[in-house]
Image (tube, helix red, strand yellow):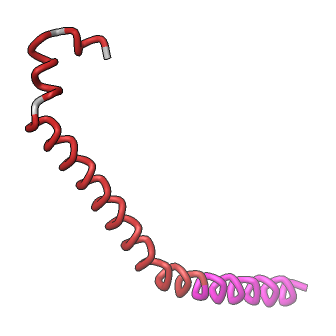
Amino acid sequence: MVLIGIPCLQRLVTSSSYTHFLLSLCEWEVSARKALTDSQEALYPVRAALSVHLRQIDQELEKCRREKHSSAF
């Protein structure tokens, strides 16, 4: 990194507080990713149920279209 040549930034990068900050940031990212994965997994049953209902709606719409088409003749 080019900015590391600046003395005050060298002190910051090598300081324990900066290291602690980076570790905290990494821990936060891991926690955020886990929460996202957990929430996505929780949505699987909802998606499955919606998929079933959408399929039923599509079948009913197709049935109505056929009835409408056959009654037109």
User: Is 57 displayed left or right of 31 in the figure?
Assistant: right
Q: Nearer the viewer, residue 63 or 15?
A: 15
User: Is 66 displayed left or right of 49 in the figure?
Assistant: right
Q: Residue at x 17, y 38 (%)?
A: 19
Q: Residue at x 27, y 49 (%)?
A: 26
**Which region shows up in magenta?**
52-73
User: Whole-percent x and y of residue 62?
Assistant: 75, 83
User: Is 55 displayed left or right of 35 in the figure?
Assistant: right
Residue 50 colored magenta? no
Residue positioned most to the right: 73
Q: Residue at x 63, y 85 (%)?
A: 57
Decide: is 31 above or below 2.
below
Most common SS among magenta residues: helix
Q: Quadrant of residue 21?
A: top left
Q: Residue at x 12, y 11 (%)?
A: 7
User: Whole-percent x and y of residue 45?
Assistant: 49, 85
Residue 69 colored magenta? yes
Q: Quadrant of the C terminus?
A: bottom right
Q: Quadrant of the N terminus?
A: top left
Q: Nearer the viewer, residue 47 or 37?
A: 37
Decide: is 16 above or below 57.
above
User: Whole-percent x and y of residue 6?
Assistant: 16, 9
User: Whole-percent x and y of residue 32?
Assistant: 30, 59
